[in-house]
Amino acid sequence: MTDVDTGLLASVLRRAAERGATAADGFLVEDTSFSASVRLGQVDTVTHSREQRLSIRVFAGRASAAASTSDLSRSSLERVVDEATALARVTAEDPYAGLPDPAELIDRVPDLALEDREAGEPAPEEKIEIARRAEAAALAVDPRITNSEGAEYFDRRARYAYATSAGFARGYATSSYGITVTPVASQNGEMQRDAWYTTARRRRALEDAEAVGRTAAARALRRLGARKVKTAEVPVIFDPDTAASLVRAIAGAASGPSLYRRASFLLDRLGTRVAAPAVTIVDDGCLEAALGSRPFDGEGLATRRTAVVQEGVLASYLLDTYSARKLGLASTHHASRDGTGVGVGTTNLMLLPGSDTPEALIRSVKRGLYVTDLIGFGVNGVTGDYSRGAAGLWIDDGELAYPVEEVTVAGNLLEMLDRVEGIGNDLVLRDRTASPTLKIARMVVAGN
Amino acid sequence: MSELDRTRPETFFSNRFNVTPASMEQLLGDTLARRVDDADIYLEYRVNEELVLEENVVKKASRHVSQGAGVRAQAGARTGYAHTDDISIRNLGDAARQARAIADRAGQSGTLALGGRGRPHDLYGLAEPPIVTELARKLELLRKVDAACRATDPRVKQVIVSLASEEIVMLIATASGWTVGDVRPLTRLNVTAIAEEGARREIGTFGGGGRVSFDFYLEAQRWKRFASEAARQAALKLSAVDAPAGTMTVVLGPGWPGILLHEAIGHGLEGDFNRKGVSAFAGRIGQKVASELVTVVDDGTIANRRGSLNVDDEGTPTGRTVLIENGLLRGYLQDRLNARLMGMAPTGNGRRESFAYPPLPRMTNTFMLAGQDDPADIISSVDRGLYAVSFGGGQVDITNGKFVFSASEAYLIENGRVTRPVKGATLIGNGPDALTRVSRVGHDLALDEGIGTCGKDGQSVPVGVGLPTIRLDEMTIGGTAV
């Protein structure tokens, strides 16, 4: 593992103590990234970036405050510490505030293979060529692929360090790579765009650039000729990508801050059935080389596997130290530092697969909607009420019949979970959140 | 930010980082001029402060400092961008060479883009910017908002109040020899109320702000209105019935429902999408895209508004751009790159989230001009429909034109009268066609309270919207009541 310099953090935490802080912790992120986009074969935008951010949390007894800076000069760091300690003196005492028990902090940081160590960093020209090949493959699929929003290649290397005023200091390093292609298909004056991507911790684990381009093109092409459908209550099948967004919404409602604010449809549901028995949702931060993995959370606690929903029963919330104490529970090691504070974040979040093939799920529907794209923000985390714009394909007699657009799908997340009638066998962890194909027995599709 | 010299950005960056307009211009000249079509160096220093009250006390306080520089070089349609959060002439030189590599990879026309010059506006010079107002006053306000919200309705069980204050100092030097800076204050007060009754629980949110001083919240007891509106909205939803599903007439109230314009047409008229021909509005200038009752403008020059800017993030003074005039499509929103490539003039809409991103064409304050109708008449003209007065977020697919926006406070209209509140529902439509369905426009144009944030390509920027009461014939409403 690449060494991460924790000396800077340690000196910042020392200054906080000198300024009267009773405890403090800090997180340092440094990253370097590159991205190149190509459009219609020509280079569009090439970006090089280097960023760093140091964030600290200081406690004055049971009161706390946070601060961060991207200016790591001595004078700036001193100012940030002084401001944070001053802020901590004006905030209210909170009996639940504080650092985790030092005995629970991670001891040995496991190597989760989060960093690509292969030698031979390609030159920018080679990276641009990857994007160019991906887009060219999309453009070559069909004459109806007439335009493109481009293809992008990116890579990023980051180092993270966490330290506490009690002397704890650990770090780790990661890398990530990705290719995205967004072609435009057109026919008879209608234009449709869609996208496909691959992303991975190691460059060699990326899907073939040309295959990504071909998939993107196929996705744009299958939207051509889309129409609205009549308003009806029908079975709805979410493809893996759109189903993953449902899983994210459930995790949001299971997160500590939503719960202690009483702003969650999963409030007071721990240990009760919240979904069909076939539904199991886990968050696993220890998977080797996975995009959501990290050896420890934003408070130095070792990541692990947490079953959020186990066979339909709400088995665990997702908690950091603060929200856990407020709820009278133990942290589930889901603290996240986003550079501005401490919150709750998932790692690799998955709805576990069932036994049906996606084709069998589609065949099981007489009349219904297969959803491939969702837009808008119509998810109410307090009530679970759900209403979003959708596009996809109409299912007629068990077959994908024609593309659909300009409709909404609506229901309530608790009802939708209860009405899960089929789970695909097609789970692939291709991003931080993943789901197999998911069939909901009925939802309201609004159109004409 | 007491240490911050806010008199002039030039002085600020020169004192703090020893980077002067002269050294930036020299860098542009030495490294970039004659090799690219356009280039600029953008310096930014930002301080954010956030105070959050929950469970009756202020427990969260944070302060964040960001600084950095972005160097951009353009040749043809190609952009090289490099940024660093360590501002020094040496780092800027490295970034400039990285950005320039884009131009070295292909031939270049060797002509520099011009334009962008003009006097910056003076839209938000404040005697006391919100970031410097003393904490004690801010904390007291949060406590008063909390108490007022709870006092509005006994069913309010949880109140979260946040006050965010920000100041950005920016300085941009362009290859055409134009250096301009801006100091941008911004503040927002947000109130969230959770009301409970039996097993039912609902959320209401309200807020506002702008490029204004802290006293803005005290004027006419604005804070109290924000507090009671959040409580009222949460309590109201406790008795809301399922929203209808399907097509019906929709009346949008004034102000924030202007998000319709932002999604239905605003994004589709951004220059980049039209240059690339991927917008549903591409090539449609001069065509009818709305009812003749509809005139829509984007105006970045309104004093103290959240979406306003003295100059955009490329140094071009903001303007007032007519997007739709009496139903006809008139103009696009342009940054320098897309304006140059389309042979049009920049409109002062080149914006970026921070130094870490190259600018894109973005909206500022987008609104529809007032019409003639009395709002009450508009409602009474509808037999059966939806009256929506507040919204959450929206989104658009600019290529097929489909857009959504989600109502957070809406009512049924039955026999010309506003009746029962309905649960939140997403409205969906088609951008090039939605505004052709506008059949009535009220005389009550209002801009929103100052809460909007727009996302594009992973970049968030503050924006404003506005609308008079309007009637839209036949919109699809995504409720659950079939």
Image (spheres, grey):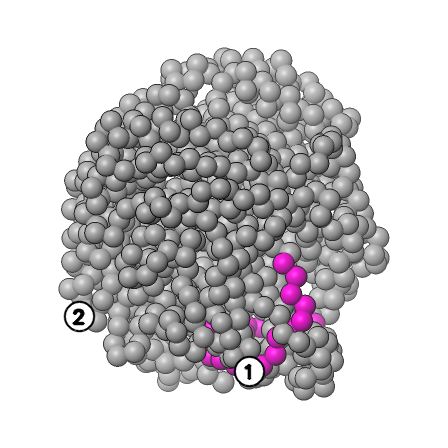
In terms of depth relative to the viewer, which is nearer, B391 or B95? B95
Query: Disc 1 residue type?
Result: Arg
Percent position (x, y) of residue B304?
Answer: 33, 41
Query: Disc 2 residue type?
Result: Pro
Decide if residue B462 is in sight here: no
Element at label 2? loop
Percent position (x, y) of residue B127?
Answer: 24, 31
Magenta stretch contains residue A213: no
Indicate which disc residue A442 carries: 1
Q: Which residue appears at 32% of the width and 56% of the height?
A: A323
| Whether residue B86 is situated above or below residue A298 in the rendered picture | above
The C terminus of chain A: image quadrant: bottom right
- Distance between the Cα atoms at labels 1 and 2? 37 Å
Q: Is residue B238 left or right of residue A425?
A: left
Decide if residue A167 is in sight here: yes
Magenta stretch contains residue A424: yes
Indicate which disc residue B154 carries: 2
Q: Which residue appears at 64% of the width and 25% of the height?
A: B98
Q: Could you tell me if the residues under marks 1 and 2 are in contact, i.e. CB atoms within 8 Å?
A: no
| Whether residue B209 is situated above or below residue B257 in the rendered picture | above
In terms of depth relative to the viewer, which is nearer, A320 or B295? A320
Percent position (x, y) of residue A338?
Answer: 44, 44
Q: Is residue B329 left or right of residue A260?
A: right
Q: Residues within 10 Å of mark 2 (few under 14, many from 20)?
A: few
Element at label 1? strand
Which stretch is magenta?
A: A403-429
The N terminus of chain A: image quadrant: top right
